Image (spheres, rainbow, N blue to C red):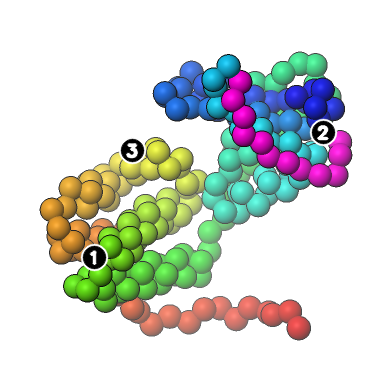
Amino acid sequence: MRETYEAVGIVIAGSIVRGEAGPTSDLDVCVVHEEEWRVREQKRFAGVPVEIFVNPAAQIRRYFEEEHREGRPCTAHMFATGEVIEPSAPVIGELVAEAKAWLARPLEVTEASLTQRRYAIVDTLDDARDVCGTDAAACALLLAACVHDLVAYAFWSRRRFQPRRKDAVRALRSIDERAAALVRQWQDASDLGEALLTVEALAAHVLGAVTFFEWTSPQEPVTR
């Protein structure tokens, strides 16, 4: 990494570093350099999959801000929980401290944004109802999208960061056992009709709505 990218610092992160590796786990390597470009690589070293993220410090700081706003602070998590490979420039210590501060900062979620998410989910659920009797594949895809977004909403509504995809159901159980049980019930549904009813129950529980509802967005300025 140092030879290829003239790195001023390297942070290695991921489940392998944290001692939580599974059979398909990879290493995340964050390379900081002083050039005005970024690149991402995926390679294997000694059979281990490695994701390499090469960025200048300013871009990493942009990731901290953008990902926090999206509720998925991936880059901040890598810098806060990873291992710094020495020697490193002072900016690496600064980035680690900033990452920890971003993770400690509450997630900012407005009621208007929550309402918009609720509306989008029930709109997808209405689409699933429309095709349930005519296109089983489309219905199944739409219901899966609903469940995905309902799980996400459960965290948004509590001002919590989104969990990793593979941890989503386990993390959901820690904040809402009823919702997690309904997700499991949806997974075990014997047919589309049962799956649809289960997703409707999940939507009613998480959103308090299962179909189109009246709503007006706030006024927002537009660029000419």
Q: Which mark is residue 170?
A: 3
Q: Which residue is drawn at 76% across and 43% down?
A: 38
Amino acid at dot 1: Ala
In screen coordinates, is 134 left or right of 29?
A: left
Q: Residue at x 73, y 41 (%)?
A: 39
For residue 37, what is the image quadrant?
top right
Q: Which of marks 2 and 3 is nearer the N terminus?
A: 2
Mark 1 / mark 3, whichever is N-terminal: 1
Mark in the foreground, 1 or 3 = 1
- Nearest the eye: 131 or 75: 131
Q: Name the residue under label 1.
A: 136
Q: Find residue 63 and report its horizontal and vertical position in percent.
A: 68, 46
Residue under circle 2? 33
Tag 2 secondary structure = strand
Q: How far apart are labels 1 and 2 at the CA level?
A: 50 Å
Q: Can residue 27 be seen in this view?
A: no
Which quadrant of the figure has residue 215? bottom left
